[in-house]
Amino acid sequence: MTEAPRIQRSMPQATREDRRQQLGARLKEAREYLELSQDEVARLLDVPRTAISLMETGQRKVDAIELERLAEIYQRPIGYFTGDAGAVAPPVPEAVQHLARTAAKLTDRDREELLQFARFLQARQPSRER
């Protein structure tokens, strides 16, 4: 009987750990951007809160089903978390992030008024740098 050939890992262990930590950092950033607690995400994912903490620090692997569900919760493509260059959103200025978080708490009608006001500001001075 012959022995099955061993499959070599294509990625050194250090790189795998680095990637897991990068994934965790992106998960944490997305959660904080939506102002969700680890407890809230844990309930939505049906895992203990400590699992979310360990994922965010890169100490726990995230399986494909969990990643798919986290992408859905955080409203981002899976590629954003895995570092797919085509899926990583460009950085958004902090002031714009704050405005988005604040606008998310408004009623639909108030958000529509805010959008109309933003359009008014854009039209008011079209030559102004944006």
Image (cartoon, grey):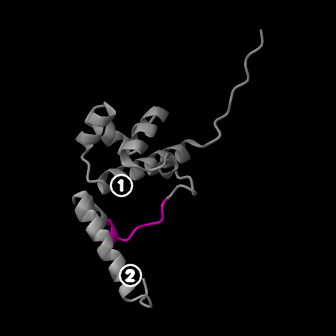
Relative placement, left or right, of 45 versus 128 is left
Q: How many neighbours does mark 1 have within 10 angstroms: few (below 14), some (14-19), or many (20 or more)?
A: some
**Chain part drawn in magenta:** 89-97
Label 2: state its secondary structure.
helix
Residue 130 percent across, percent down from the top left = 42, 82
The residue wearing badge 2 is 122
Residue at x 49%, y 34% (from the top left corner): 64
Task: Give percent across and percent down for residue 38.
Answer: 26, 43
Residue 96 within the magenta-colored segment of the rendering = yes
Front residue of 129 and 63: 129
Residue type, mark 2 in image: Gln
Task: Answer yes or no: is residue 50 visible.
Answer: no
Q: Is residue 45 magenta?
A: no
Tell me residue 95's x, y (percent): 31, 72
Q: Which residue is rendered at x = 77% and y = 13% of the image?
A: 2
Q: Which one is in front in this view, the residue at disc 2 or the one at disc 1?
A: 2
On residue 29, which mark appears?
Answer: 1
